Amino acid sequence: MAGSTFGTHFQITTWGESHGAGIGVVIDGCPAGLSLSQEDIQAYLNRRKPGQSRYATPRKEDDAVQILSGTFEGKTTGTPISLVVFNQDQRSRDYSEIAGYYRPGHADYTLDAKYGFRDYRGGGRSSGRETIGRVAAGAVAAKLLEEFGVSVLAYSRSIGPVEIASDPGAALFQDSSPEAVLALRKSIYGNPLYMPDSDAASRAQEYLEECMKNKDSAGGIIECVLTGVWAGVGDPVFEKLDAALAKSIFSIGAVKGFEIGDGFAAAKSRGSENNDSFYHDENGQVKKRTNHSGGILGGISDGSPIVFRAAVKPTPSISSLQQTVNKNGEDIEISIRGRHDPIIVPRAVVVVEAMAALTIADLILSNAGARTEYLKKIYGAGSKHSHS
Amino acid sequence: MAGSTFGTHFQITTWGESHGAGIGVVIDGCPAGLSLSQEDIQAYLNRRKPGQSRYATPRKEDDAVQILSGTFEGKTTGTPISLVVFNQDQRSRDYSEIAGYYRPGHADYTLDAKYGFRDYRGGGRSSGRETIGRVAAGAVAAKLLEEFGVSVLAYSRSIGPVEIASDPGAALFQDSSPEAVLALRKSIYGNPLYMPDSDAASRAQEYLEECMKNKDSAGGIIECVLTGVWAGVGDPVFEKLDAALAKSIFSIGAVKGFEIGDGFAAAKSRGSENNDSFYHDENGQVKKRTNHSGGILGGISDGSPIVFRAAVKPTPSISSLQQTVNKNGEDIEISIRGRHDPIIVPRAVVVVEAMAALTIADLILSNAGARTEYLKKIYGAGSKHSHS
Amino acid sequence: MAGSTFGTHFQITTWGESHGAGIGVVIDGCPAGLSLSQEDIQAYLNRRKPGQSRYATPRKEDDAVQILSGTFEGKTTGTPISLVVFNQDQRSRDYSEIAGYYRPGHADYTLDAKYGFRDYRGGGRSSGRETIGRVAAGAVAAKLLEEFGVSVLAYSRSIGPVEIASDPGAALFQDSSPEAVLALRKSIYGNPLYMPDSDAASRAQEYLEECMKNKDSAGGIIECVLTGVWAGVGDPVFEKLDAALAKSIFSIGAVKGFEIGDGFAAAKSRGSENNDSFYHDENGQVKKRTNHSGGILGGISDGSPIVFRAAVKPTPSISSLQQTVNKNGEDIEISIRGRHDPIIVPRAVVVVEAMAALTIADLILSNAGARTEYLKKIYGAGSKHSHS
Amino acid sequence: MAGSTFGTHFQITTWGESHGAGIGVVIDGCPAGLSLSQEDIQAYLNRRKPGQSRYATPRKEDDAVQILSGTFEGKTTGTPISLVVFNQDQRSRDYSEIAGYYRPGHADYTLDAKYGFRDYRGGGRSSGRETIGRVAAGAVAAKLLEEFGVSVLAYSRSIGPVEIASDPGAALFQDSSPEAVLALRKSIYGNPLYMPDSDAASRAQEYLEECMKNKDSAGGIIECVLTGVWAGVGDPVFEKLDAALAKSIFSIGAVKGFEIGDGFAAAKSRGSENNDSFYHDENGQVKKRTNHSGGILGGISDGSPIVFRAAVKPTPSISSLQQTVNKNGEDIEISIRGRHDPIIVPRAVVVVEAMAALTIADLILSNAGARTEYLKKIYGAGSKHSHS
């Protein structure tokens, strides 16, 4: 499979460069009959668009999405859904300088090494704008998941050295009611850094101000919790739910680490501490007393909230002096100008949500073939008329 | 794609359960003309087979591999390579107890939730024996990589709280000569825990002894370094080299975290610290002064060693008392008997190597289509006779 | 995807050469809970094994299948089903002659051109024995289809110039009751050529005797009818049901043509003749008055029997003199010795059934994701407990 | 894989409906460094656009293509190439009538059966306009093939009962020089029916006039010849070159039959007639004396021109009276009004070329991994610097 396609059943293909005509995505395999409007998608895109706060690039882009195909009378038809955001901010500035050298921490050098040359305008295909396609498609996946009571919530867990005090994953393990989900979402949206802890957000802003003053940038950790995923989604071998999530999240530029449940802390733990005990709740349902597993056992969802974290590196574009090479074979010093995000984390929060939603939607579709009895529920057994 | 297939170009499909007839793998897409013998593969399997030390299950299994197809006169033919290890230790012990309850930390509950029932003998498809197919196939991938000067080395970086003092990834960044690679390999094989630091290995053994005395188990961190991967392998979007590695490593049971280069530490770093400067070496080659990126920029290899780590949870099978549920709807207490590894890490080291080799081999094959000029090198241009 | 894998959801991977250790297949994606025994599979293999009549190679092969994984207590577990037939007839005859030249009509030359060399023993991977894996897997697919009332029947429609007088496809369009299906099956099995017309079979035998006397070989046409496939299976664009069938049937060696419904005759027809009118039957079901379409409209099944034909070329291995080249650069004359089928058609009948069953099974699984309401039938809507 | 994606290495995803915003395609996996302009693509689209002759719908559509991504400074960058044709002719006519019944020979009924409802405006996704994406992508594939000296030529071999007298496939087997290819192409473009035989074209026009007078439609046979494909492209098992072509051509709406080389005639032939003898030509190259195989042996190209034929059914939209059903459960009579092609064949000729080009391009890319030595030609062996 070529590299711009993600998913097998709920499959997306993204296209577009930072300074080309636009950015788009084709979703193939979305089931028919799902209510879908342009607004559903725009709401997600608005969360990643530039200019939301002083901690994001002030570049002016409306990022207005258009649905070009795949819906009819407000519902998906089962055929490919083509979504596009045309680029507005394509002013023909002079890229000759950037064309001639390799920016440290960027893909400039590796793109040249792979393809022999590159579209150097604004990072081309490796620009953060590539995630527009992911977020637009993720909004559709999230809409589908809603039909099954699945919610996906991501937020900034830490920015630089500042971490939130609360543990939203643990809280949702205790209570994953729609009200609890809504309360967390409100708290996340309560500040421009998408931290569900206003005190931590204030301190993080101070930290960012200092970074900006020093012409430097910051990283952080995004945490994501999925509620409502029933036990049994995923696969025991290569398509483990956690493996699929790891790939989808790691495919977001700037992610350098991924962990689920106790994650790296589990490496120092003991079996007696790390194992989650099972019990029957008052309704006779099998439940776990703890959620060290992060909602996944043996690659398959265990019915508890799925909790994972992604480490995001500091924005590589900084205006302080850096050493690099140019195409004339010279070692040079550069200072990157332009409008750059001092931190990627807040705008990447919705990208993480989108990729998680796409991953789960794909696996839920895949899972429909897991049991012969599932197919009989759809098609009936031995009677060609029962399903029509 | 069904869940037991991995890779697109160098593609493997594994099969088999812990207590069935055997475990196997079919490799489809291995290029023709590669020298390959049963011994090449057996050497890898011997590193994961049980009974190597007192920190591994004493179960008796030779794990002798047979090549059933795909080679002729000592070379691969380009057709599927079928490898099998028949199970020896299939004594018909009584599984009725384990059949009736869900072991904490295992996939028993989730397999039932997905498929409606499960092969409960020894974990079935979710057993660690499933990795035999991966290791056998990984040995073939590693043989292919050797042809291009790529080496893959994994080792135990930490066991429980005990970590090695050396930094093999940094050392290979300075010197990745065949001699340096060989020296590290010797050091890794110098103790049964595969730690390239004999002092740490001694302390780790003490820690494990204590765990065993307490009927408990331990986890740890496996680190892996790939040398010789040239700049340009990988993909800028969904098939990023790091994303592909993340999935392949996370598809190994018990892995709970994955990071590349500085990993989670990058989240607390600043751009000025995290960016790796470029320079020209004495041969005019583009090099990096540091390797915070772990050898990958924008999803594509940057020519530096690729360095990643995986967090492995403690073995869930422990003999101390645990609480769980049985199929009669009762909450019960259990104590797991039998021959279990007190730690998974040392035997998983070669599984990590195997999955890394399979991932890189797949992407190197994929990369052959990246440039029109590459295809001309193979086929010539416009002349149908030049390539025969 | 490497070339020995077929299917996306019900996915098979075959391996093995004519004179290697054996031939096998791994089925990944078969739903859990399907009753399956070795006998189910052996019954299909027996229909393709050599030595059934004087019109097939007298080579001695039992072709006894073993299930190595994927079932437990007589049911599929949802994990990979590994099937193997070990080769018995591997006597080390001298292949040095055949190794040195290219047999006309065979893949000897093209395999060398692709891979640089080949396993020349008995055709290697391009041998007819490769179809063992397909037939074994097809038996499992057919077992699954039975659960939904789908039957697959293939037969020899013509051998050389001799064609059957009956039109089984038209008959099943009028009456596709289980009794009608059974009666046709009996008629097919009534002679070693699998022609559902004993008179035609007699004449075809005379034709074959004459071919054999002249050291020559014959071709023919296989027809296949699928009953019980409900309307709605398939896809409107690239994964059209007829396109998927075309590929699966054309992937059988020696097939040179494929047509569905009226096929090539439709090219000379007019719209008013070729269109099938719709009407409501006595139960209010939508039906067609004719079946020129062969059961597929716009790539999707229309509820009528699916009828297709495959043209099979004459066996290329003939003992009369032929001109070819050897590896010394000489033009030579050869006469192929050994035990060869004078006609491929009768033994290929079950291979066509197998490939058709695999294709439909894959698309039925795929179709489970076509509608949001289908998924709700499986998982419930918004309640994580309703499906357990 | 969802159904709107074709190919594995040179992979395309199409989207769009007849009366939506537009029709498009994303090409992922096209190698970097290929010269490509909008004109290259428009030239292909112009051959399928409506209104070219009185035997095509007079609908007014410019079908002007735009390249939205994937090229830079006139060359492909290796990233996804997004192509779009916006629909002009979307006048909001009244579709309420067509919405209520099922047109015979169309996908109306089967789309409803699959998805539960359909976009009934102009056939939606099952419209002939869907092929715009294929043709646009096929133009890019053809541009790539040109780099390797491969040409793809399709033409109308027969229309209704009228067949061309010449045998272009046989002629190109004797002489496949660029001059011979060009001469055939001129002859094809010499009449609006794309028949390389002006006498046959005249008679075919008379036949079509009569069909139109009778409010009826006609079918025909498209033949396609590929020259310059060297021996060794394809695969011995499921991804046979002929199987891949069969699927790609059968995925074009209205195709009901496909054959390669002697095709269905081979079924009546004998081995001694059907086998193609090998010999060495004056340059010592291996050649065949005849081309009954149609350029493919054992699924792999044999170096001779590849010759195949597709049977196309008559246009199902006819204005004479037809019987069908409506959604009120009534049996009704209809007469389809509007601007319809009396024959699909001439406009489908370029669609066949496009699908053939896409298929071969995909397999040529795939083939780059067939031999270890091929990879060494690209990457060097054991030296990470030799390829940069």
Image (tube, coloured by chain):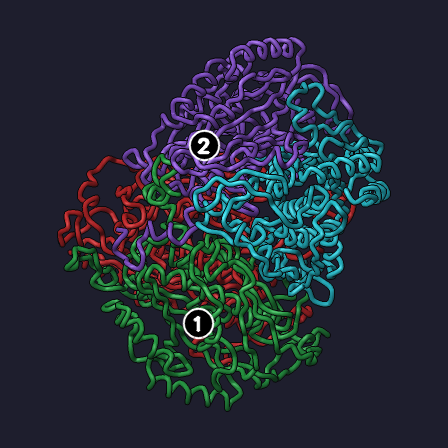
Chain colours: A cyan, B purple, C red, D green
Q: Which subunit holds the residue at mark 2?
A: B
Numbered-mark total: 2
Name the image quarter holding the C terminus of chain C.
top right
Q: Where does the image place residue B87, in percent across and percent down from the top left?
A: 47, 25
Residue ID at (23%, 35%):
C92
Q: Which residue is mark 1?
A: D350
Q: Which residue is mark 2?
A: B138
Q: Relative to C306, is C286 on the left or the right?
A: right
Residue ID at (63%, 73%):
D19
- Residue B111 visible within the image: no
Q: Amino acid at mark 2?
A: Gly
Q: Nearer the viewer, residue D26 or B170?
A: B170
Q: Find the distance from the CA under tag 1 to the CA under tag 2.
A: 45 Å
Position of residue A267 relative to residue D308, above or below, is: above
- Identify the image quadrant of residue C23: top left
Q: Which subunit holds the residue at mark 1?
A: D
Residue ID at (51%, 85%):
D216
Neighbours of disc 1 within 10 Å: few (<14), some (14-19), many (20+): many
Q: Amino acid at mark 1?
A: Val
- Identify the image quadrant of residue D227: bottom left
